[in-house]
Image (tube, rainbow, N blue to C red):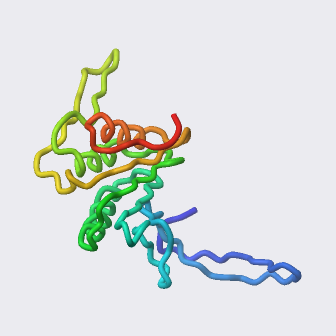
């Protein structure tokens, strides 16, 4: 362990040899993308169009981090520019993450209504409502879920379903 930017030497023994090769590497913080597409293009960038003819977009949210909403916004903007007519949001096996990211993403698609509310024995009830000025309030949505969709992915799915913005497809 150590800070980003520090050099570290790794000893690598390749299959079929007994010689240890020393490989210097520099520590960096690895940002795992949370928004991925259906398949990769020839240049290895993600392709977010599921069906070019019907203009159906596809985004998979692997988990909810501080950059997820902004990354999704850029992706959906690009899809809208190409004439997307519907969007599949895949949160299958998504373990969740930041509630704030799920709220912000929900707010992109919901023009009014409650996104989520929290109530507990020792905390006051709190509700987050959709804000006006939604950019994608008319884009048809389908959300893919499975038994491993949890936490923030459940918040997003429920908010979109309860506000009549998406059909939920998958298993409970």
Asked whether, in this view, residue 9 is left or right of residue 41, the answer is right
Asked if 62 appears above or below 15 in the picture, the reply is above
Query: Which residue occupies 55% across, 41% down?
Result: 148
Asked if 65 appears above or below 12 in the picture, the reply is above
Query: Which residue occupies 54% across, 64% down?
Result: 2
Provide residue 157's location: percent of width, then percent of height. 38, 41
Asked whether, in this view, residue 28 is left or right of residue 127, the answer is right
Residue occupying the far top of the picture: 121
Asked if 148 appears above or below 124 in the picture, the reply is below
Query: Which residue occupies 35% across, 42% down?
Result: 156
Q: Which one is in front, 163 or 118?
A: 163
Provide residue 69's location: percent of width, then percent of height. 31, 56
Provide residue 100's location: percent of width, then percent of height. 30, 44
Position of the N terminus by quadrant: bottom right
Q: How many marks?
A: 0
Asked whether, in this view, residue 67 is left or right of residue 10, the answer is left
Residue occupying the far front of the picture: 53
Q: Which one is in front, 94 or 22?
A: 94
Q: Which one is in front, 39 or 9?
A: 39
Residue 16 lies in quadrant: bottom right
Provide residue 38's location: percent of width, then percent of height. 48, 66
Q: Which one is in front, 160 or 126?
A: 160
Query: Which residue occupies 43% across, 66% down?
Result: 50
């Amino acid at each position: 362990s150590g800070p980003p930017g520090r050099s570290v030497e790794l000893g690598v023994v390749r299959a079929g040899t007994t010689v240890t090769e020393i490989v210097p590497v520099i520590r960096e913080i690895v940002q795992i993308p949370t928004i991925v597409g259906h398949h990769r293009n020839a240049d290895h960038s993600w392709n977010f169009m599921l069906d070019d003819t019907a203009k159906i977009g596809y985004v998979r949210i692997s988990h909810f981090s501080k950059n997820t909403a902004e990354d999704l916004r850029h992706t959906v903007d690009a899809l809208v520019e190409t004439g997307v007519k519907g969007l599949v949001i895949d949160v299958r096996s998504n373990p969740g993450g930041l509630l704030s990211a799920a709220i912000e993403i929900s707010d992109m698609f919901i023009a009014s209504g409650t996104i989520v509310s929290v109530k507990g024995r020792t905390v006051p009830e709190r509700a987050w409502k959709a804000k006006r000025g939604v950019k994608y309030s008319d884009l048809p949505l389908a959300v893919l879920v499975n038994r491993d969709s949890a936490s923030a992915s459940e918040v997003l799915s429920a908010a979109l379903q309860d506000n009549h913005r998406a059909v939920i497809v998958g298993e409970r």
